[in-house]
């Protein structure tokens, strides 16, 4: 089972745990259920917002995996930071940390590298590298709904259909949620369910997943063939309890969600395990978030990529750099590749580090960037 969990996958899990997980009451206007459902759907269409998510998975009381992510979404750019720790077996774990910045022309990613047999790569691995490539996005839709489901309108028929489908899945489980005041206009919706309260469709769906998993299992594999306990196919799954809280502000905005799940499983070798999952999701600065680039001179690369679309600008850049002219196809090829560099102590681009691979500086790229910086200083 893959344990690295993306921001959008986490959001989807939270929504499923709360809505399709049947934390419900009667669907009447003003009810806890309607308040929660509307707030969740409203959250899908937040723009210029900051979202933070954390997921923790425990197996038999021991932490198995943890993932954290924060995303700053703006009108014309997006910044995300994610980190995860994965259990690779007894006494072994690996941590990952990634930052991404994307605008209409740029995609910037932080790079961490393990040492290799190359001396240059060994030197490069001890530093924080940045990767810059041309963004494949031609426009930005900053809402989660547009990113995840290609839905752009809160009042569309797509959203209405999804709401009606959720209402149908909930069925007659209508008395599990409560709503209370938390002060400052914030309302908290809380609830919990057990397996006996799950809709029949959910129970059949779980059984179907287990059946399909077993159907593709190779019966010749032994326990030693599996590195992680959760990779072993299961024969049964029992949901002991799912509970959660959601905070809604006075404007009907979802600002915080916490969900917990406790399940029991039995695998093909007869081993029984207790699985616990914790999910938290929060939103802040709704309508005001402005993502900050990862370093001070990000516009230098925007100038480089925009110039590659204009012959005269591109020619002027090469004339200013003093190096032989090359047609923009060279830079357009970086759509599938990238430029790499480090920053100095003041947060500026280390010109001597710029290259098409970490630890392999390129004299021509350095001269191009220098020319852009010099022209910018002259124009200011």
Image: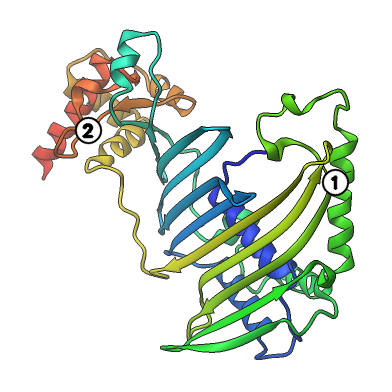
The residue labelled by disc 2 is 343
Q: Is residue 124 above or below residue 187?
A: above
Q: At which x and y percent is residue 110? A: 37, 36
Q: At which x and y percent is residue 134? A: 42, 34
* Mark nearer the N terminus (2 vs 1): 1
Side of 349 where 141 appears, left or right? right
**Label 2: how many Cα within 10 Å (few below 14, some 14–19, many 20+):** some
Side of 28 where 338 appears, left or right? left
Res 135 → quadrant: top left
Q: How far is mark 2 from mark 1, CA to CA?
A: 49 Å
Q: Of helix, strand and loop, which one carries label 1?
A: helix
Q: At which x and y percent is residue 79? A: 40, 50
Q: At which x and y percent is residue 1? A: 68, 39
Residue nearest the observer in this picture, 21 or 300: 21
Is residue 283 visible to us here?
Answer: yes
Q: Residue at x 50, y 43 (%)?
A: 137
Res 218 → quadrant: top right
Q: Residue at x 45, y 44 (%)?
A: 83
Q: Is residue 277 above or below residue 153?
A: above
Res 233 → quadrant: top right
Side of 79 where 2 appears, left or right? right
Count numbered badges in the picture.
2
The residue labelled by disc 1 is 210
Q: Is residue 103 above or below residue 165?
A: above
Is residue 158 visible to us here?
Answer: no
**Which callout, 2 or 1, points to the residue nearer the camera?**
1
Q: Of helix, strand and loop, which one carries label 2?
A: loop
């Amino acid at each position: 089972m893959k344990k690295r969990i993306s921001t959008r996958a986490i959001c989807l899990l939270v929504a499923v745990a709360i809505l399709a997980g049947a934390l419900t009451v009667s669907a009447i206007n003003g009810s806890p259920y309607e308040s929660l459902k509307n707030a969740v759907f409203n959250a899908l269409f937040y723009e210029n917002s900051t979202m933070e998510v954390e997921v923790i998975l425990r197996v038999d009381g021991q932490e198995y995996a943890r993932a954290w992510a924060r995303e700053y979404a703006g009108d014309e750019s997006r910044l995300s930071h994610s980190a995860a720790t994965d259990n690779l077996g007894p006494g072994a774990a690996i941590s990952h940390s990634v930052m991404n910045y994307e605008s209409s022309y740029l995609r910037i990613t932080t790079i961490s590298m393990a040492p290799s047999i190359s001396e240059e790569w060994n030197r490069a691995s001890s530093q924080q590298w940045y990767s810059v490539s041309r963004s494949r996005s031609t426009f930005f839709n900053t809402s989660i709904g547009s990113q995840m489901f290609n839905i752009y309108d809160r009042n569309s028929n797509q959203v209405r259909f999804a709401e009606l489908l959720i209402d149908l899945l909930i069925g007659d489980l209508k008395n599990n949620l409560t709503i209370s005041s938390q002060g400052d206009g914030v309302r908290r919706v809380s609830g919990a369910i057990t397996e006996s309260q799950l809709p029949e469709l959910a129970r059949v769906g779980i059984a179907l997943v287990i059946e399909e998993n077993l159907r593709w299992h190779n019966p010749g594999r032994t326990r030693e063939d599996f590195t992680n306990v959760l990779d072993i196919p299961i024969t049964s799954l029992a949901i002991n309890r799912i509970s959660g809280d959601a905070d809604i502000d006075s404007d009907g905005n979802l600002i915080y969600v916490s969900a917990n799940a406790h399940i029991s499983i039995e695998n093909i070798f007869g081993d029984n395990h207790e699985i616990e999952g914790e999910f938290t999701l929060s939103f802040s600065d709704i309508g005001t978030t402005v993502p900050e680039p990862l370093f001070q001179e990000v516009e230098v690369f925007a100038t480089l990529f925009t110039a590659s679309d204009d012959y005269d600008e591109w020619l002027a850049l090469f004339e200013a750099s003093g190096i032989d002219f090359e047609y923009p196809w060279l830079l357009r090829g970086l759509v599938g590749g990238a430029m790499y560099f480090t920053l100095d102590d003041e947060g500026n681009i280390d010109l001597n580090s710029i290259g098409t691979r970490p630890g392999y500086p390129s004299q021509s790229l350095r001269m191009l960037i220098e020319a852009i910086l010099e022209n910018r200083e002259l124009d200011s």
